[in-house]
Structures are given as structure tokens and as C-alpha cells.
Amino acid sequence: MFQRERVEIKTAEQIRLMRRAGLVTAEGLRAMGAAVRPGVTTAELDRIGRRVLAEHGARSNFLDYGADWGYPPYPGVVCISVNEVVVHGIPGGRVLEEGDIVSIDFGAIVDGWHGDAARTFPVGEVDGASCALSETTRRSMWDGIARIRVGARVGDVSHGVEASLHSHGRPYGILREYTGHGIGTAMHQPPDVPNYGRPGKGPRIVAGMCLCVEPMATLGGEDVAELDDGWTVVTCDSSRAAHWENTVAVLPDGLWVLTEPDGGRAELEARGAPFASLD
């Protein structure tokens, strides 16, 4: 492993280790998503995440996050954000209700390597606008990921996310204060991967980089506020938000989505993007 402009470049073996963390992350999201229903509390979902980590001998990269920088230590192993909460919702006594949407952001550390991903789930029957928001955000994540390739720029990925979000006939709010990021021996590393931008700008993408692409979009405006707990981020206009994220490894001959059970093959090939695996 070596540094290139402060960006951590991984060897093939290190990416294989990150794949293990990615699969634990994917399993936690699957288990928590299966438990989403009216009447379930966000604390119950957090307990499922803790159980999955324990079953795989993994550690949480969310629990106590921020303590080293003087922030209130994050108290959960998962961020659970309901409706108007965009990101960093703290698990607790909030009860999921019919018609809610809930974004679950989860990660794992295995042998010192990190995985990080997020999904948005419907709670029972959900209105069409909220379903479209989540699906549009999911597609924009994949459309951004499909722009990743050796020699491209981070701005190409950012522009791919933004163009996708703007291509569905309505103006979704795109969060600008929160971005995707590099990942590896820490959960958040350079480079930042914004969800808007101009193609051809930003750091150049090279083999061995690992990036988290994570669009956050709203049914209203882009303005958000942080609550007094120091973590929870809500829309200022109380509009609903969706959040999707995957960890992606850049290989010389293509991409490997470390937090997808199939490595991202189906979604990448549907977009004509090169899939590569070290399995």
C-alpha cells in the first residue's frame, strides 16, 4: 500500500480483505431491511446490526465515531434516518409507522479494513412520490458508480450522480454539505466524492482506489440543519429524504462493488460498465 496525493491505494490482497468487510455490511443491511415494518423501533434495528457484527467477529466503524475529534461519541452501530431525517439519525425509541421511509447506513471493520453502505426502505405501503425518490436516488448511485474507471476524474462520478437525479422529470434536492468519500483503513478518507459537479474535474481515479458513492436527495430543497444532539441532520423544509451508498473498488480492468453480494455485476453490466472481481 502506498500514498498518492494522500489517497490510499490498495493492493489486490487488501481489496480482498475489504470485500470481507463489505459482505458483513451487506448482510447487516439485508437483516435490518427484512425487519423494517410498522411498530418496529429504530433501537431494535440497531440491535440487529450489533448481532450481525458479533456473528462475523467484526467491529463497528460507527460506534463512538467522532470522540477523537471532540464530537459527541456516536452511540449506535447504525445510522437510522426516518422521513425528514436525511442522515445520522440516532437509533432509539422512534417507532416506524405505516408509510414511512427509513434510510439505514451501516458499516463494519474486518481485520482493520472498512465497509460502508446505505439503503432506503419503505415501511409498509408508501406513497408514490416517496417510492420514486428512493428509486431515483438508488439509480443515481449506480449511474455515478458506472462513471468510475481508471483515468477518469472524481468530477465525472459526481456529474453522473447529479445528471441522473435531474433526469427524472422533477427537481430533487441534492445535498451539498455531505458527500461520498474514500475508504480503506479508515471509514472516511480522501478524496471527497460530491453528488454534484462538472466532468473532468477533481482527483484522477487510479487502480487501487476505493470510493463510497452515496447520493442523498430530498423531495424539497437542499437546505439541512443539524439537531442539538450533534448528529441528526434534517431537511429545513421537512421534506422527505433518501440515501443510498456502496463501497466500490477500482481494479485495473473494471469495478468491484464490495458491499453488494454479486459485486455489482448486474447493475454495472446493465449500464455497460466493466465488472471485475478478485474472487
Image: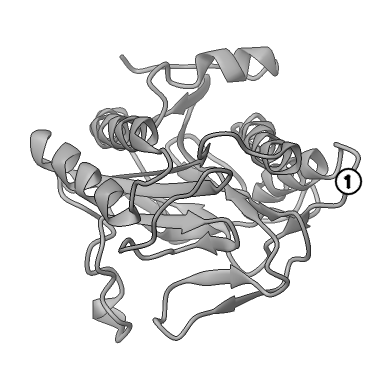
**88 relative to 10 in the view: left or right:** right
Mark 1, Cα crowd under 10 Å, few <14 / some 14-19 / many 20+, is: few
Give percent across and percent down for residue 191.
52, 57
Is 3 drawn above or below residue 142 in the view shown? below
**Res 240 quadrant in image:** bottom right
Q: Amino acid at mark 1?
A: Arg
Is 228 drawn above or below residue 125 in the view shown? below
**202 relative to 77 in the view: left or right:** right
Q: Is residue 47 visible?
A: yes
**62 relative to 130 in the view: left or right:** left
Closest to the observer, 95 or 206? 95
**Res 66 quadrant in image:** bottom left
Going 30% across and 86% down the picture, which residue do you hit? Answer: 70
Quarter holding the N terminus?
top left
| Residue at image mark 1 | 170
Going 22% across and 69% down the picture, which residue do you hit? Answer: 64
Give percent across and percent down for residue 237.
73, 71
Closest to the observer, 254 or 122? 122
Going 39% across and 35% down the picture, which residue do you hit? Answer: 33
